[in-house]
Amino acid sequence: MNLKTISAGRIADKVNRGELKARDLAEIVLQNARELNNKLNIFCSIAGAEALEQASAVDQKIEAGICLPLAGVPLAVKDNFMYKALPTTLGSSQFKSFYPPYNAAAVDKLIAAGAVVVGKTNVDNMGIGSTTLDSPQGPTLNPGDLQKVAGSAGAAALAAGICSLALESDSGGALLQGASHCGVFGLLPSAGLVSRHGLAVHSGSFCRAGVSALFPEDLPVALKVISGYDPRDAVTAACREVNTRRDKTDDLSNLVVGYLETLSGSAADPRRNLVKDTLNRIAALGIRKAAVQLKHLPEALRAHQVIAAAEASSSLLRYDGIRYGQAIEAEDLELLYRKTRRATFNGEALNRSIFGTYFLSKDGYNRYYRQALKVWTLIREELKTVFEQCDLLLMPVVRTGPFLASGETAYSDLLENDLFTVPVSMAGNPALCLPAGDINGLPVGLQLIGKQFEDAFLLSAALKIAPAIISDLQGFNGGGN
Amino acid sequence: MKYETVIGLEVHVELLTESKFFCACPNHFAAEPNVNTCPGCLGFPGILPQLNKVAVQKALTAALALNCEIALFSYFDRKNYFYPDLSKGYQISQFHVPIGSNGYLDLEDDQGLLKRVRIGRVHMEEDAGKLVHSPAGDTSLVDYNRAGVPLIEVVTEPDLRSPGEAKRYLEKLKSILQYSSVSDCKMEEGSLRCDANISLRPVGSDTLGSKTELKNMNSFKAVEKSLEHEIKRQRAILNSGDEVVSQTLRWEENSQETIVMRGKLQAHDYRCFVDPELAPIQLTIEEVEEARQNLPEMAEARAARFVKDYKLPGYDAAVLTASRSLADYFESCLAIYDNPKAACNWIMGEFTARLNSAGIEVDRCPFTPHFMAELLKMIDDGLISGKLAKEVLDQSIASGKSPSQIVEKENLTQISDHGELEKIIRQMIAEHPDSVENYHGGKTKALGFLVGQVMKETKGKANPQLVNELLLKTLEG
Ligand SMILES: [Zn+2]
């Protein structure tokens, strides 16, 4: 069975009707996962017996007459979500054999809905990053070009046809960028809509849980499963009033899609044309366009770096290898801390720990942190104004294609690449990455952004627009052959 | 030169809640280490803090009881530092905006005049765990039972002028927090901890001298003693022309002196910032007013009521209400026993003396108010003498058995049976004819001797009044 030609919804249908055994599918999927993993380095761990047991449990429920929305659907889970059955490595040798004593809320909900966890997907050190270049097992390769990174291992698992859904996290663009690089649909739900219980949060302000899929119609179903108030995550209290907001669009001619009039000069040309082409295509559906401005985009990027670093420098302090995970033996405690943290932190987690400590210090607080908070307010206000002029905002996701898997990329380029994804991170809006075309033989996505908690509306509109946008993708082969 | 003492106190108080501040672990004293823990308070990844609203309510009550202005909008900050007893590497605390500020407490100064001690802030925070060092000193273990327990920190302005004032402040603070059910304030269990800042300055000067910080005082008495000690030490330094070094000192209870704990006081950079994982605390004016209305009767008001309702002398009422638990004990006893003065005398006298010498808290004492009422009734009914009652009290405290159980078991009931006593009296008169003669010869002392003989014969169980009465009747008849 080729997962790239059948949606999660149809898989669930077949399993619910008894036409397909979840267990049979799981066996095929696991074998596929093992084979492709050798080539693409997608998984930190692949579930064996656990996945088969889960699938059998699904089959038993179906036989007992229970209908499950995600019955038998193969699911990839990013390795910064806690899952009891497999180690949760957080992309660090400190946690290489850490079995958390609890499941993440989203993992529990997806399993309860019938999904089968195929494996834990590769993640940057301490869950920080959008390349997997900072993973101890090396980067996950892009199924479309093995010289390049996938960005998100979950998106790679979808593009390679191993899974139908991927549980993802995002704090500055990892989810959307990964979806863009791999040509899949990535949904970053509104802040406060999905519980982060069991997600190793390094930035309470920006970390969110989301989901990616091969087929856009699977996203509303998955979102319904994982969203909702959870007392274990205080920010989800805000989503209890969501039902008062609009949830679908009936008439596309009433829809106004905004776009950035002046894309920042450094956006490579083909990408700017992609936005233009896409706008023309959706205009043909009767949708109106509106030019809008996000003047603080460059400052938002800097502010996001400062705040994310500050929060990570504090949130990662707990990783000392003493209460859980592994510490490196030393003569005294101070040395144990130093050795352990030096050996198990790298890349962006290390950078943010150092810079963030400075940003929060007496000297750095006023100079950087306080200023960053002001910019945060500005970009939120600015996005609010934008949504007075349009219902949805169409923007690029990335400035450049996926980085080289060899890691030969300037640090500044890595940071700059978050330019288009940080506004949403900072303002809490939902965003959906749709594959919109390809450049140099690799898929490129665009993001549609909605108002906070209008996720259902965003998805409903996107599903109507998607066929007009993704036509170029026909024939794209994500297998990397 | 004459110096003026300037003291400020920082008091940490554990809040009386069922569970911890940000997880569901129980908040009570546990003998076994690390039993009151969960992934949340152990700082596991992926567990976000869940605010205990009762703790906020208690902190609000405390701030109101201490006459503070209440911040309707406040939030939690993270105070970052690396220490093994701090599971997350940061402490959740209120740094930028405390829930209460600009409060005060009124107390008597050393001249007996009323003075107002300003309370700069009352803020909420979570407690850290505790390090347990091995006797050999080669290993340290961490007990996280206390990690995440809700606290308030009450910080005074430097308004206290003597160790005595500091002690009275603490007593008053303890009474208010106990009365308002904010905390049980048990210093020996660590639910009230006090650090003191102290400096001296020439009388008349209005600039502050350089201060030292005192830690590790385990009782109010120790606070007073350590401050007295530190005043002497600082005065000697200043008189010799040197400067007091700003440092942290540790009070050593055994040697009754301070030792240097940390060198120069330096402002540690805790890199405080708003905790992004917790929602801000938003209180409404209605909530605050409701909490203000619900503030309980405090010690002074209760003492006044005791004087009025129970006709107790003012002094007695003040002693009984000094701690809420003693006042509660008294009133629970009165619910089943109706002689307030007798209850007051026994509770203030014999009972308190025994608690003090045994070092037991009122509410932990096995001798319940019910037992006290039972004991007092037995005295009133003439079943036991006052002297015997003290013995019963001792035994009851030691064994936890009720007074009636003890009296019954030990066969301690007073002999008030006329027939039985008359028999013994006749026997004693027969055995001591010379005493009888002396009595008739006008020596009244002889009567005392005979009463004593009867008491001796009955092993003290005879009702002495009755013996006296019957003996007279027999001798005169
Ligand atoms: Zn706990």
Image (spheres, helix red, strand yellow):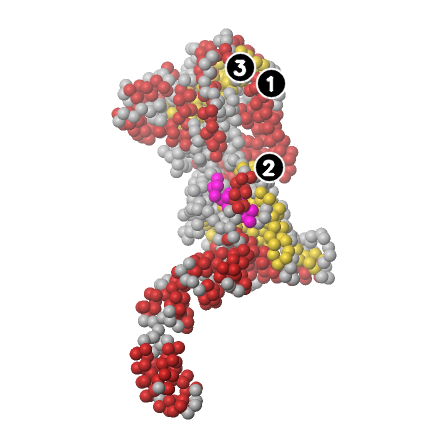
> Ligand 1 closer than 8 Å to the CB at disc 1?
no
Give the residue displayed 63% in from the left and 61% down from the top: B112
Quadrant including the N terminus of chain B? bottom right
Separation of marks 1 and 3 at Cα, in angstroms: 13 Å
Q: Judge whether A288 appears above or below A355 on screen.
A: above
Q: Position of residue B402 (x, y in %)?
A: 36, 63
Q: Position of residue A252 (x, y in %)?
A: 48, 12
Q: Is residue B402 magenta?
A: no
The numbered dot on residue A360 is: 2
Residue type (three-letter) at the residue carrying disc 2: Leu
Q: Secondary structure at mark 2?
A: loop
Name the chief secondary structure element in magenta.
Answer: helix
Determine if residue B362 is in view.
Answer: no
Tell me which label, 1 or 2, sits earlier in the chain: 1
Residue type (three-letter) at the residue carrying disc 1: Gln
- The residue closer to the viewer here, B454 or A127, is B454
Q: Which residues are magenta?
A: B51-65
Q: Position of residue A411 (x, y in %)?
A: 57, 26
Q: Find disc 3 in the rendering and name its residue.
A: A257
- The residue closer to the viewer here, A356 or A320, is A356
Q: Find disc 1 in the rendering and name its residue.
A: A293
The answer as to whether the residues below labels 1 and 3 share one chain is: yes
The answer as to whether the residues below labels 1 and 2 share one chain is: yes
Mark 2 neighbour density, 10 Å: few (under 14) some (14–19) many (20 or more): many
Which chain's residue wears label 3?
A
Q: Secondary structure at mark 3?
A: strand
